[in-house]
Amino acid sequence: MVALVDAAAAHDHVGPLSEQARLAVRHGGLGSHHLRYAGSRLAGYAHLDDGPAPAAELVVHPEHRRRGVASGLLASLHEQVGPLLCWSHGRLPAAAAFAAARGYPAVRELLQLRRTLSTPLPAAALPDGFHVRAFEVGRDEQAWLAVNAAAFADHPEQARISLADLRQREGEAWFDPAGFFLVEEDGDPPRLAAFHWTKVHPATPVTEAVGEVYAIGVHPAYQGRGLGRAVTAIGVRHVAELGLGEAMLYVEADNAAGLATYRRLGFEVAAVDVVYATAARPADRSRGV
């Protein structure tokens, strides 16, 4: 599986699977797995998140594309759940052509934004009556889960994060509670109002290390008080202080408020992921990627 994913990433210059799918491959969990072989060699893989809105991620080895592997994977997915959503990481032309040939519309875009950390960073002052501290493992999980669920109530993936998911990420090598910021309203006891969870992607032979705005949210009861901008700046300053040269984040293309906040902080669009709505009976069954 690693060889398949690495070959696709090297060919397409973008990772073919989301973090959630990669964790499912490594540790099990939600979803199911579909495989296609060419002889004894793994030619294609699909991960299906069969939740309320079934969604899949497909990857085909570059040497086995345009041979019906993706079509076969998609057929097996449809047999399991019927119509579903399908991710294309990086808005690849081949994926767009595959979808267009079958009449699959693009229904969602997830933007990757980036910002250099070599230019001045904005102020990170919180409004009066609030303070920030680092996440504490074993203490803050339930409070964070509640605020995350409220902040992302309409988000198809983030809202579904469970305690098991959070514990799984706490066990990852990249997890650092010092970069997981909780903003609380002063009081006895203080109340969690917002958070900024950062992540550092280590350098690879072809990429520099980069800091990610991994998850950021404000409880609906505290929105409109400037917490979003302040807590974003706090996290970005943190990754800059680690000596990293660039920060990145993901945001929905239709999240106008979030986009406005991030652009004011100097972030610009660097890449786009696309979700296509696939039907069990495509208009055109011609072969694709």
Image (cartoon, rainbow, N blue to C red):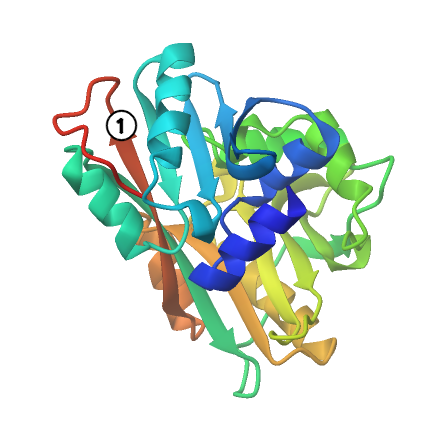
Q: Residue at x 46, y 45 (%)?
A: 223
Q: In this figure, which residue is indicated by the disc labeled 1? A: 278
Which amino acid type corresponds to the residue marked 1 in the rendered image?
Thr
Q: Secondary structure at mark 1?
A: strand
Instruction: Report the number of discs.
Output: 1
Q: Residue at x 64, y 73 (%)?
A: 237
Q: Nearer the viewer, residue 278 or 182?
A: 278
Q: Nearer the viewer, residue 282 or 86?
A: 282
From this view, report whether residue 28 is shown above or below residue 14. Answer: above
Quadrant occupied by the N terminus: top right
Where residue 197 appears, x then y in whole percent? 65, 52
Relative depth, front residue between 120 and 189: 120
Extreme residue toward the right, this view: 138
Looking at this view, name the residue that lies furthest to the front.
39
Q: Position of residue 209 (x, y in %)?
A: 66, 72
Say above or below: 61 vs 37. Answer: below
Q: Is residue 52 left or right of residue 105?
A: right
Which residue is at a point 70% across and 54% down the rendered structure image?
A: 181
Counting from the top left corner in percent of width and height, residue 281 is at 20, 18
Task: State which quarter of the image contains the C terminus.
Answer: top left
Q: Looking at the picture, does residue 102 appear above or below residue 260? A: above
Can residue 53 be spotted in the picture? no
Q: Nearer the viewer, residue 288 or 107?
A: 288
Horizontal and vertical percent position of residue 283: 12, 26
Q: Is residue 39 left or right of residue 209?
A: left
Q: Residue furthest bottom?
A: 119
Q: Can I make out residue 81 in this image?
A: yes
Q: Dividing the picture into quarters, in which one does residue 147 lie?
A: top right
Q: Residues within 10 Å of mark 1 (few under 14, many from 20)?
A: many
